[in-house]
Each structure stands twice: as C-alpha cells, then as structure tokens.
Amino acid sequence: MKIKFVSFFSAMGLIFSATAAMAGPDHGHAYDFGQPGDPQAVDRTIELRMGDNFFDLGAIEVKAGETIRFVLHNDGALLHEFNLGDPATHAAHREEMTAMFQTGALTPTGAHDMSNIGHDMGNKSAVMEHDDPNSVLIEPGAREELIWAFSKATGLEFACNIPGHYQAGMVGKVEIR
C-alpha cells in the first residue's frame, strides 16, 4: 500500500524533498540485511499473526541467503505494520509514522489516500509515503505478504512502528542461523 501526501504550498520544494528522502537509508532502498525477494524463489513461508498490540511470535529464525515469504494476518481492531530493521531503523521509521498520523494519512484503523488534498497542513513534509520494501501496513482483518531475501543481520528485528505499538512490545527478534 502506498500513501502519498503532497502539500499545495510545497510544490517548489517537492523535488528537493524527494531527493533528500532518497538520500536516506530507508528511502534509498539499500539494506545491509537483504533485499526484496523474488516471489518465484521463495525458500520458506512464515505465517505471523498480530493483534492489538502483539505478534504471536517473539522471534523468527532465518538462514543467510534464504528468501522468506511472510504471510501477515491482522486479527486486531487497529492498523498494524510489519517492518524489518535494526533498532535505529525502527526509531527513524517511527518518526515518519508519527508524521503520517499527524497529517491524517494514517488513522488508528486504516490508511487514507492523501494525494488529492490541495491545501497546506501545517507545513508537514511535502511527500509522505509508506512504500519501503521492508515494510507493509496491514489493516484490521486483512492479510498481506512481504517477501524478503536475507543476507546477514546483527540486531535485526521485526516490529510495528505505529505510534505506541513498538513501545507496547510489538517487536520480535530475527535470528540468523
């Protein structure tokens, strides 16, 4: 799911903002722990269920070089996220998620397409997207998939970075065997 917010008064800054966003580690889509996986080359499937605010697994084990299809079920009443990263990546992503809630692009139960809004919303970021390949939003009652090819990892976690969810314990370890 891709959510974009474009502020009317930020049109001239759009190119600068997009370029700056691409320079960061999350938006440049370069990850030292792997990359999006090929759906035709999946080695194994891991099903993960989530509720308000927990994952049914506290840890997952993967092999370096393994491609995993994560099948993600949101059994809760709130919007949740599955995001792969280290604690620093999650902290940065939580800031982005907080901004998305402040603009109304995300609500506690879902996502809204903000691309047609033509007014300034407090000079928030000109472009807000939830389109990182290591992350997926799962609305209440929905099922989503994420396919990831793991390379290596130290301190890798899976987490929900919806404001307050990580802090409530919605995080687990990814162990490389």
Image: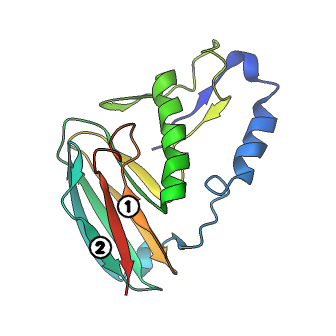
Answer with mark 2 or mark 1, whichever residue precedes in sequence. 2
Q: Is residue 119 left or right of residue 46?
A: right
Tag 2 and tag 1, C-beta contact below 8 Å: yes
Identify the residue at image location x=43%, y=81%.
Answer: 41
Give the image quarter of residue 9. Answer: top right
- Which residue carries the number 2 mark? 60
Q: Taking 67 as reference, is 114 above or below it?
A: above
Residue neighbourhood size for the residue with mark 2, other residues' Cα within 10 Å, grouped as few (<14), some (14–19), many (≥20)? some
Q: Position of residue 6 (x, y in %)?
A: 64, 26
Q: Position of residue 93 (x, y in %)?
A: 52, 47
- Which residue carries the number 1 mark? 158
Q: Position of residue 92 (x, y in %)?
A: 56, 47
Residue neighbourhood size for the residue with mark 1, other residues' Cα within 10 Å, grouped as few (<14), some (14–19), many (≥20)? many
Identify the residue at image location x=22%, y=51%.
Answer: 54
Q: Taking 24 as reference, is 109 above or below it?
A: above
Identify the residue at image location x=39%, y=37%.
Answer: 163
Q: Nearer the viewer, residue 151 or 110?
A: 151
Real-space CA distance between mark 2 and mark 1, rounded to the nearest whole angstrom:
9 Å
Q: How many marks?
A: 2
Which structural element holds mark 2? strand
Tell me if I can see residue 96 in this picture.
yes
Identify the residue at image location x=64%, y=13%.
Answer: 120
Image quarter hosting the N terminus: top left
| Three-letter amino acid code of the residue under disc 1 | Phe
Q: Nearer the viewer, residue 52 or 128?
A: 52
Tell me if I can see residue 2 in this picture.
no
Q: Position of residue 158 (x, y in %)?
A: 38, 61
| Three-letter amino acid code of the residue under disc 2 | Ile
